[in-house]
Image: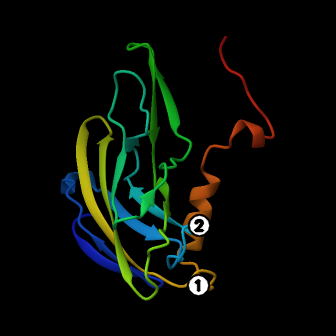
Amino acid sequence: LPGGAVGETTGNSITLDTTAPDTSSMGVDILATGAAGYGNSEVVTVAVELKTDEAWHIYWASPGPGTGAPTEVAWKLPEGWQPGRAQFPIPESKYDKLLDETTYFLEGKPVILTPVKVPDTAKVGDTVTLTANVNWLMCKKECIPGSAELSLSLPVIAKGTKSEPANAELFTRARDSLPVSLDKAEHIKVVGS
């Protein structure tokens, strides 16, 4: 959704404000799995989806030495709410002989997931606003920096209350694109010496 927009997903209100130049055709969205649970053991997963045009890419969390700028998501949350570590999908890589280095990047519609811990002080019935400041560098032959401030309003529900998960397909796709830890990997390929 290039430019500013307001939209809705199942039970969650979304406010978008993107500031990337129109020439970049970059879209950004923020989504959640459902209503926030009550209690200090509850976690709501929030997703930032970035949408690039064909042949454009953004850089991964660690783009490689000397190239690109990492895509960053910084959270502004209500008091007591704690963001976990951002989870990036497995990047593409490209070796540049001239520079003698490898660059790591994301194409298409990469989704960055962040688990957010709900504090035990959260009040059932309240609505909280989660805000993400997202920065990226989108490149094709030229590069265009971009940023967006995204807000998501979520109702706080009682712990254990069943809520209808929103955006299930997107979250399944995002989780399937995450790296697998070595202890859970079925196959391991060692490259280099």
Please, which residue is most extreme toward the bottom here?
125
Can residue 1 be seen? no
Which part of the image, by quadrant, shows the N terminus?
bottom left
Which part of the image, by quadrant, shows the C terminus?
top right
Q: Position of residue 118 (x, y in %)?
A: 48, 68
122 up-or-down from 101: above or below:
below
Can residue 23 be seen? yes
Which residue appears at 23% of the width and 43% of the height? 145
In screen coordinates, is 74 left or right of 97?
Answer: left
**SS at mark 2?**
loop
Which residue appears at 50% of the width and 76% of the height? 36
Mark 2 vs 1: CB contact within 8 A: no
112 up-or-down from 67: above or below:
below
Which circle marks residue 41 in the picture?
Answer: 2
Which residue appears at 44% of the width and 33% of the height? 62
Q: Position of residue 5 (x, y in %)?
A: 25, 73
Which circle marks residue 108 in the picture?
Answer: none
In screen coordinates, is 97 left or right of 181?
Answer: left
In screen coordinates, is 14 left or right of 121?
Answer: left
Residue type pointed to by label 1:
Ser
Q: Which residue is mark 1?
A: 163
Which residue appears at 60% of the width and 51% of the height? 177
Please, which residue is most extreme toward the right here?
186
